[in-house]
């Protein structure tokens, strides 16, 4: 997308300042367009986005508070859920405030360093969320296939090490993103056709060689999603095999019910993400504003819906939420 297409919407002096012939970091800043092609509707787009962000903040903070305050919930399933809630808070807060500022008050400019930090947090914590979903699948596998040894296998020490492994993996895999970007030369307009700093959107602005950046970004995406989905699939294949051996339909339904909320969260996280990834890399005929909307919703919908899914489908969480809000002073 060229600057000409934005000339009717942005003033000429502003466009001139964005069109430096060449520059290197850290002097420059980027210009976030928001939702390209939907400038007239951006205030209306901001409304559901703000609602999703509010749901993410309230829902995940409530989940963390309830699990923290109730010792009976300090079990593997709820400890992993608290990790998921914390990651969702960071993920939503890394995206929504700046995106809403762009859409509502036209705060389009973002500093070079701030852009790299935002990009790192978004991609690193997306990787961590995927890792926590794998850990939750493992918890369900142990609980159903080895119920007598569940507390021995997933004791607090193991859960802590799993959490640390998820954190370290996310950091190590994504640290090269900003490092590789710092080596690029940008000699065209620094206008990003997004509401936030997305990795490939920034890479596409460079006029130097970007093969390494593109290859590493694609490798990380395929590695994280591919291995994590495979691990989840293997876990649920064993779970399904074990459940089908359980005598009695009621017992089988109860076993499946324990996995229901987790399956919903997996679908909420991976389906929009994979669809956004495929449209970004292969959907060349899909309008750009559809790419941007999908990419933005992918970062806000899971954090907003995950607490609702677990609040509705998990009896212990639901009961404690109701107890908090109905408790008399």
Image (cartoon, grey):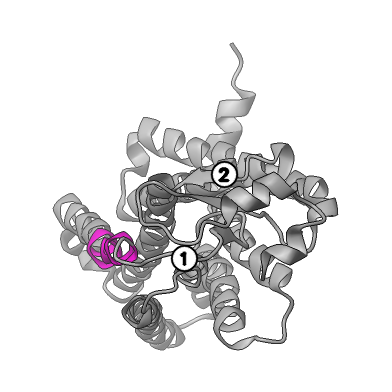
Label 1, secondary structure: give it: loop
Residue placed at 38% from the left, 30% from the top?
69
Q: Residue 293, percent across and down? A: 68, 64
Q: Residue 86, percent across and down? A: 40, 45
Stretch of the chain drawn in magenta: 169-181
- Is 211 placed above or below 173 here? below
The Cα–Cα distance between marks 1 and 2, rounded to whole angstroms, is 18 Å
Q: Is residue 119 left or right of residue 193?
A: left
Answer yes or no: is residue 45 visible.
Answer: yes
Main secondary structure found in the magenta portion: helix
**The C terminus, quarter of image:** top right
The circle on residue 109 is 2
Answer yes or no: is residue 312 visible.
Answer: no
Q: Residue 1, percent across and down? A: 67, 71
Question: Outermost residue toward the right?
Answer: 40
Disc 1 + disc 2, Cβ < 8 Å: no
Q: Is residue 233 left or right of residue 197?
A: left
């Amino acid at each position: 997308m060229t600057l000409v297409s934005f000339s009717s919407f942005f003033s000429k002096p502003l466009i001139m300042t964005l069109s430096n012939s060449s520059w290197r970091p850290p002097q420059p800043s980027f210009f976030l367009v928001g939702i390209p092609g939907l400038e007239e509707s951006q205030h209306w787009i901001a409304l559901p986005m703000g609602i999703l962000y509010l749901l993410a903040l309230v829902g995940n903070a409530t989940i963390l508070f309830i699990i923290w305050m109730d010792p009976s919930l300090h079990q593997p399933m709820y400890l992993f859920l608290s990790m998921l809630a914390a990651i969702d808070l960071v993920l939503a807060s890394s995206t929504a405030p700046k995106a809403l500022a762009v859409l509502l008050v036209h705060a389009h400019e973002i500093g070079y360093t701030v852009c790299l930090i935002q990009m790192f947090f978004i991609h690193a914590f997306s990787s961590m969320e995927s890792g926590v979903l794998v850990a939750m699948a493992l918890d369900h596998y142990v609980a159903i296939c080895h119920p007598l040894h569940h507390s021995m296998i997933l004791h607090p020490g193991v859960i802590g090490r799993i959490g640390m492994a998820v954190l370290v993996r996310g950091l190590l895999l994504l640290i090269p993103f900003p490092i590789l970007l710092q080596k690029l030369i940008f000699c065209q307009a620094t206008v990003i056709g997004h509401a936030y700093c997305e990795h490939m959107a920034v890479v596409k602005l460079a006029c130097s060689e970007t093969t390494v950046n593109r290859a590493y970004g694609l490798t990380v995406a395929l590695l994280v999603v591919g291995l994590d989905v495979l691990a989840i699939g293997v876990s649920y294949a064993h779970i399904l095999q074990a459940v089908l051996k359980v005598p009695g339909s009621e017992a089988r339904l109860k076993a499946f019910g324990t996995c229901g909320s987790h399956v919903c969260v997996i679908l909420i996280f991976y389906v929009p993400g994979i669809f956004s990834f495929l449209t970004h890399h292969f959907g060349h005929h899909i309008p750009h504003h559809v790419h941007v909307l999908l990419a933005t919703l992918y970062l806000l919908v899971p954090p907003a819906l995950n607490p609702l899914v677990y609040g509705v489908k998990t009896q212990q969480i639901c009961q404690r939420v109701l107890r908090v809000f109905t408790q008399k002073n």
